[in-house]
Every structure is written in structure tokens, then in C-alpha cells.
Amino acid sequence: MTNRRYTLMQVTHDLDIGGLQQVVVNICKSINREKFDVSVLCLRNLGAYVPEVEGLGLKVHFIPQKESGVDYFSFVKAAEVFKRENVEIIHTHNTQPLIDGTLGALLSGVKTIVHTDHARNFPDKKRYMFAEWCMSHLVYKMVGVSDHTVANLRKYERIPHKKLTTIPNGIDGGKYQVSIDKNRKRKELGIPHDGPIIGLGVRIAEQKGITYLLHAMPAILKRFPDLSLVIAGDGNLVEALKQEARELNIDSHVFFVGPRLDMPELLKLFHLYVLPSLWEGLPMVLLEAMAAGCPIVATHVGGNAQAITDGYNGTLIESRNPQKLAEGVVDLLCREDLREKYIRNGLQVFRDRFSADIMTRRYEELYLRKG
């Protein structure tokens, strides 16, 4: 094998706060720079992670959007970027980047296309699934972030088995080993209560099932009257959920703190991380919580069970069930020994299976067509 460097471009919607975007950033941070000259192309927007990527000395390219309507020729603009930067390998993330990236690759002569599906609720829109089936014949590999995601791609999109593989997400665990002044952090977030803090940091959308956590709160507050719930993130349901909290008369215990870049500190503040999702791939937030030593209660959906073994490094419960969610939270808050067990085992599971280095080495094999 030659020692030359390969030009690799990550193609994403944006570099805003989110799990998909963290995968892109973590690949950029942990990739072998002696083998790969890596850059990023954003198709819709830039985002909060741009300074972190540029701080690594990497280029972030951006295709400006039309003022109105859909740009059906953005793949041509992507091809121009690929040609200008002499790109040899592209790694696309989710549907639009797959379509624009693959068509752009055909126009510009890029030879290797790797795609990652970061999971969604299947069946998706028929036109999207048909487009992905078409594109699957042109890419080298299609990666699912969990076995559940790969099974859905096989079932609903009929992606050929030889094209599919699973690579679990990975993160930089060192980022989550921080020390904080917990009293100061409470004050910073405006939390007046002295009791336990449970929370999550996600996109505030239907998928995350936050309404079920709000409906579980009255039962949780009966056992822990000074408990606080911190919800970090942004999305289309923020105002509706705030109104729901008021209607449930729990709004004085629920704190919507917006999108955050200090999640490692929040995870050190939380007594529990609670993820009430309705569907998932392999959520980065569970890996973050394990790396930070924050005990987890999550729903048994999608790839969650690929990271969490119920009773070993977290509690898994059925989705859409506020009563079971409340029981899971209360039980874990009452059992310090179980929380310590989850922390200890969660750190071990993370180190063994979900580090950014493990994830990136597997992607590097695909980039070089060895996997």
C-alpha cells in the first residue's frame, strides 16, 4: 500500500448541534491525518460546530441556499466543490447528502462513496426510500448506526445485503471527564430547588417522546417534591411542551434551557439521564451519558438496547408509557447502589465499544475499500 494521502470529504446538511453532526466532528477529530486529507461540505447551513472543525485546521465548505424553493441542482454545485478540491472519497450522512453527494460524485469522478443512515422512523416517504434504493447501487457501502437501522434499510428499502454494514456511533470520551461546581451550575440554569436533577439534551421533536416524560413528572414529584427536570435543545415542539408543562402544573420544576454546548457539564449535574424516545438509531446522547458517568433510564426502542443492557448499565422501559417511565426514574433515584453499578458498567461498555477511535478506524477501512 502506498503512503499517499487520500482526499476525503464529509457531506452533511449542516454542522449544527445534533447527533449526526457529532459523528462528522468526531471523525474529523480522530481520523488518521497521515492517510486522509479530510474536509466537510454543508448543504443547507453551517452551524455551531464549525469553529471546532476549523480549529482542527480543516476546511468547511458551504453551498449557499436559494432564497426560496428547493434547489434541484445543488448536486451540480456539490460536483464543482468535489472537482475543485480533487476529492477521491465522500462520506454522506442521511438522505439529501446521499442524493446530492452521489450525483455530484458521478459528475466529478469521485470513485468511492460511503453513506451513513443515522436512523429515522420507517417506513419513510416512498420517494425518499426509492431514491435511496437507487443510490445504493452507486455507493460502496451503506452504514447503519445500529443493527436495527440496518434491518430497516433491508426491510423497507430492499438495500442489497452486500452493501450494508453496521458501525455504531462513537464519541470522544475525554470531553466528558470534567469537574464542575454543581451549586454554581444550578444557579446558572436558574434552578431554585435543592432536590435531584434529571434531564436530557436532544432535538425537541416528536421522536424524543418528551411529552411522556412530562406526563410522568407528577408521579415523580410525589416521591421527590424538590426534583427538577432540565430539557436542553431546540426544535418545533418547544412552545407546545412548555404549555403542556403549565397545564400539568409542573412548569416550576421543568427548565427548558435551549441548545447547549456545555452538555458535558450538564451531564455531571444530572442525577439521571432520561431518554423517552419513540424511535432511535443509536443515539449519541446515551454514549455521552455513559462517558460522563450519568446513570440512564431510556425506552426500549431502535438501537438503544445495542448500548444499554437493562439492569446492567441502564434501565430500559417500554415507550409511550408515563407510568412505567415514572417507576423507572423513581426506582433508580431510590437506589444509590444501582446508580453506582450503572456508572461503573456504563464507563466500561463505552470504553470497550463506543469510542470515537473505534468508530473511525472502521470507517477508514471502508474509505480504503477494505471492509
Image: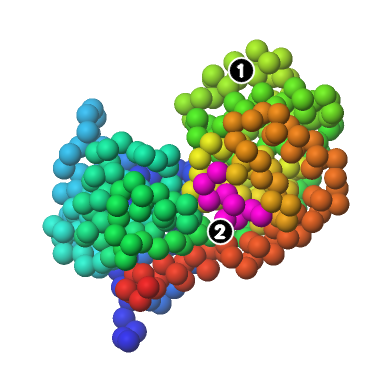
Task: Check disc 1 and give the amino acid type.
Answer: Glu
Mark 2: amino acid: Ile
Is mark 2 in CB contact (under 8 Å) with mark 1?
Answer: no
Task: Judge the density around disc 2: few (<14), some (14-19), many (≥20) Cα neighbours within 10 Å.
Answer: many
Q: Nearer the viewer, residue 142 or 273?
A: 142
Nearer to the camera, 220 or 8: 220
Determine the residue positioned at 60% across, 36% down.
319
Res 272 label: none
Which residue is at 70% across, 58% downward? 346
Does the magenta portion include 250? no
Q: Which residue is mark 1?
A: 244
Q: How packed is label 1: few (under 14 Cα within 10 Å), some, or many (20 or more)?
A: some
- Position of 98 compared to 46: left or right? left
Residue 20 shown left or right of residue 157 in the figure: right
Q: Nearer the viewer, mark 2 or mark 1?
A: 1
Quadrant location of the C terminus in the rendered image = bottom left
State which region is magenta: 301-309
Q: Secondary structure at mark 1?
A: helix
Q: Residue at x 69, y 19 (%)?
A: 251
